[in-house]
Image: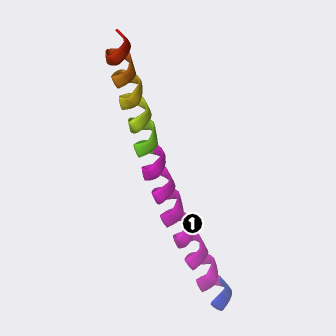
Amino acid sequence: MLFQYLQYKLIDNLSIYSHIYLIVHNMYSLYNILGIIFLNQLFS
């Protein structure tokens, strides 16, 4: 019972961390794209 509870908690925490990672990754990608567009505007 306890082991099952810990397993659920671990999976829960991993899903939270993976969501945070995906959000940060998406934001970083967005900033990269915006930066490339900005640099292209600057040097064109």
What amino acid is at disc 1?
Leu
| Residue picked out by circle 1 | 14
Residue 17, given in percent of the width and then of the height, sits at 52, 63
Q: Quadrant of residue 40?
A: top left
Question: In the picture, which quadrant includes the C terminus?
Answer: top left
Above or below 7: residue 17: above
Q: Which region is colored magenta?
A: 4-25
Q: Is residue 6 left or right of residue 24?
A: right
Question: In the picture, which quadrant includes the N terminus?
Answer: bottom right
Q: Residue furthest front?
A: 43
- The answer to which of 33 and 9 lies nearer the viewer is 33
Q: Is residue 22 visible?
A: yes
Q: Is residue 1 visible?
A: no
Residue at 58 percent of width and 70 percent of height? 11
Which secondary structure class fits the magenta region best? helix
Residue at 34 percent of width and 17 percent of height? 42
Q: Residue furthest top?
A: 44
Q: Residue furthest bottom?
A: 2
Label 1 element class:
helix
- The answer to which of 3 and 14 lies nearer the viewer is 14
Above or below 36: residue 28: below
Q: Is residue 31 magenta?
A: no
Residue at 54 percent of width and 71 percent of height? 13
Q: Is residue 10 magenta?
A: yes
